[in-house]
Image: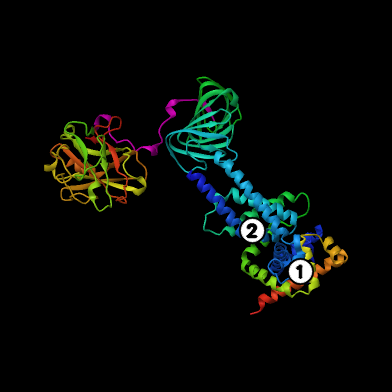
Amino acid sequence: MADSNSETGSVDLFVQLLARNQQRLFVYVRTLVPRPDDAEEVLQNTNLVLWREFHTFTPGTNFAAWACRVALHQVLAWRKKRQRDRLQFSEEFMLAIAQEVEDHSDVLEDRSHALMQCLDKLPPAQREIIRLRYAEGGSIDTVAEHAGRTVEATYRALSRIRQTLHECVSRALAAP
Amino acid sequence: MDDELRALCSAAVEGRLTDAETQRLEVRVRSAPEALRFYTAFLHMHAVLTWNAGGSETHPSSPEPQQLGPQVRTWRRRFLVACTLAACLLVAIFLVRSRDTSPVAFATLTDAKADKWGGGTLPTVIGSRLGTGRLHLVEGLATLSFDNGARVRLEGPAELELVSGSHCTLHGGRLVAKVPPPAIGFVVDTPTAKLIDLGTEFGVNVRDHQTADVQVFNGLVDAQHHATGKIERMPTGQGLTFETNAVRPFDPLMETPPATQAPPPLGGNRSDILTLTTTMGQGQDGYIQPPVETDHRSDVLILVKSTRTQSSNYNRKGYLKIDLTPLQGRKIQEARLTLTASPTGIGFASEVPDATFTVYGLTEESLDPWDMRTMTWANAPAHSPVPTTVNRKQASPLGTFSIPQAVQSGVYVIEGTALVDFLNRDTNGLATFIIVRDTLGSGRQDYVHGFANRNHPTLTPPTLKVTVR
């Protein structure tokens, strides 16, 4: 009985910790694996391993850091599996990105807050393109169709907008 | 940042990189820290935008929130669905787990006797389901029942690795395997030979992690020597020893205890070694305790305890008297006093740390004629009310021994010049020893140590072994 209670307790704790850290984990995996379908696969596997290995996690220690380590492992495993299908970045490349994220997690956190303000500063037309692109989770084609532009024009527009956002965020962080 | 890197990053987030561009991007990013920083920040931004679906979630001031309708939260919802699925899965895994400790369990720990376990990777509670992993049995007997019907009895000390439902590796120690017909083909691997069971019962003993003695009790075993690859078909009654480079008939005389297990034998001829116990002559043993109502007494054990509690009523000290008459007039060269510990069932072992005990010799010989039947806490020779010591004017320390926390059995020894000198100085043919626990228990029902006394039905009483000239 005591055992099953503690099992239930650990399920509760796990779900709670996972929910609290899901955004962080999502963004982490997405930074390493930009393709939506690939990222989703990696995340699912990560969730499974997190649960399976949850007994090795020490409550009170940094769950996000532990989860990201597990996720990185899954990213590398996925990369190896996919290597045969198409050209991939090297493992060293992935590790370098992961290290960069880890080393500058606070800066990246600040950047994502600044990003929200920068979005508000975008002209409505550009903001609409971003909304279509991301809210749809969709392709350039769909955005192009909705925006009444060609695919290439949409792609260029998106690139410009991202550039604008990136610079806006960098300025916001550089400001005293 | 330059245009090339920007273009490559855009292509990356849109999944538009060609193979050549992938390679080029990797080279760029890995060749300069600024490029690495830019790429990471760019990809991170893309990820945050994806998560927030363009920021409309956190910004109700956004122009057309209602119009976003079903598309908003796409990623969040998908992710939450994934989480929910994961949660369902958790429940499933949890249900499976409550039956099987490991999802790939293939054996059960069905029995364990007097078992003491070391650091392994598998559960050691009776009834536990076992998958791949390692078991380290320090002491006792453990029975593993494989799902295919094979049964392995492990004898401590032993180290067994479970590889699969029909394969285990014995790294050290002994086991007896019983393999019924459905489990034929069951493999016990050892450092020197692989044993393939063809329906039988056999025993194997891996010595020093490098020699395997195999004995077939009943049936047939194929034993393949690792070094040569040669297979020996062993019928009932056959015994073979597999060394790293040779196979020879099993010789039971090879089974000598390792030197580290027991102290070296006392020197001198056998005729010069004398063994004396508290059962001989005027010998006596027992323990003293303050007068208190307690059921915690023993007729067969010498109880010893020192505790931190305010009331010292539960302290106990052990007393031994050995009749030295057989040694009269002979010079003692070596001496060894042996005590056999046995569980008392009194108190919590976790409330006593690793414990040190000191054995004192009574130097005030006029006090030697004590009698256990009339001796009390107050009138005992060399008594001190302090639980961790004795009256040092009447007795002196001869040696110490230690018992690790929670260990309740074993043989404990004191020896050395202090003991030899004490015995040689004796003039009345009687030696009194006092056993005191130097280590205080917590005072919260801490464990009472016990050593077999002269009345113990099976264990050896306190024993003095000496060599004389």
Residues A23 and B254: in front is: A23
Give the residue drawn at x 65%, y 68%: A108
Q: Is residue B262 magenta?
A: yes
- SS category of the residue bearing label 2: helix
Determine which residue is flagged by label 2.
Answer: A22
Q: Position of residue B219 (x, y in %)?
A: 54, 20
- Residues rendered magenta in the picture: B246-275
Q: Is residue B236 left or right of residue B327?
A: right
Determine which residue is flagged by label 1.
Answer: B64
Judged from this view, the residue extending furthest toward the bottom is A176
The amino acid beneath tag 2 is: Gln
Q: Quadrant of residue B68?
A: bottom right
Q: Given the image, what chain letter belongs to the residue carrying mark 2?
A: A
Q: Given the image, what chain letter belongs to the residue carrying mark 1?
A: B
- SS category of the residue bearing label 1: loop
Q: Position of residue A44 (x, y in %)?
A: 67, 51
Neighbour tally class for label 1: few under 14, some 14-19, many 20 plus, Cα within 10 Å: few
